[in-house]
Amino acid sequence: MHPEQLLAAVLIITVSTLVRSTFGFGDALIAMPLLTLVAGVTIATPLVGLVALTTAATIVIGNWRLIDLKAAWRLIVASLIGIPFGLYLLQTAPESLVKRILGLLLIGFSLYNLTRPQLPYLTESKLAYPFGFVAGILGGAYNTNGPPVVVYGTLRRWQPTRFRATLQGYFLPTSLFIASGHALSGFWTSDVLRAYGWSIPFVFGAIFVGGQLNRRLPVAQFIRILYVVLMILGILLMV
């Protein structure tokens, strides 16, 4: 990795972690397309996986009393089954195909959140398994396991406090499994570990600053702007 790429990677990781810490989501959705454009999928995926694990662990340590594993365990189990399929996709699929799939995911999830369609109420909790399985595949391949979980929580009409707590209970074990899978699959190269090492101080700084911004920024307006940006990034990946 050239110095310019390393600098860009650290900057992208810092900004994406700041967004995650401020609004509770969005780190992988921002970092994956940008890092893929800068350094390629095989560097972007394990690097974002390591940072996501670090961020999840840090947030859980500070908010462990809010974790609701009872609501998250079906999603976790299904995701752990799906993650190896995502890792296989990452190893075997052409990078151009991976970029297009990631672009479609970004465009679709952005449109979903911008339009906020009236979706049916999901009464059956066992449907967490297919949502979790798809999340695992996306997490193993692109670290984007969040969107299916967010859609599932929306269909279940989770209250905001339960939503946040359940996401925390979900992300830590799945992030650990995803990062371990990347390591065992040989994706933790010297370039990945070097970029991660340079990013760590900025990651912790972004987590702290994001916690302060969370209390002050107009969240709804920013999130709409963020989804427009994500849609543009998705289109760029499709080109």
Image (cartoon, rainbow, N blue to C red):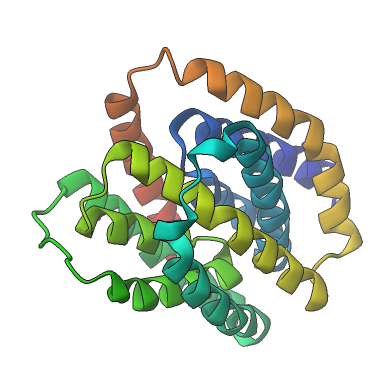
The one of 23 and 154 positioned closer to us in this rendering: 154
Residue 191 occupies quadrant:
bottom right
In the image, 186: left or right of 226?
A: right
Residue 188 occupies quadrant:
bottom right
Percent position of residue 127, x then y: 29, 75
Q: Is residue 239 visible?
A: no
Residue 160 occupies quadrant:
top left
In the image, 152: left or right of 184?
A: left
The one of 160 and 237 positioned closer to us in this rendering: 160
Q: Residue furthest top?
A: 216
Q: Quadrant of the C terminus?
A: bottom left
Q: Is residue 196 visible?
A: yes
Q: Residue at x 58, y 72 (%)?
A: 141
Q: Residue at x 72, y 30 (%)?
A: 204
Q: Is residue 155 above or below residue 7?
A: below
Q: Is residue 94 above or below residue 232?
A: below
Percent position of residue 106, x then y: 39, 57
Q: Residue at x 62, y 45 (%)?
A: 56
Q: Is residue 4 above or below residue 110?
A: above
Percent position of residue 124, x then y: 21, 71
Q: Quadrant of the N terminus?
A: bottom right
Q: How many marks?
A: 0
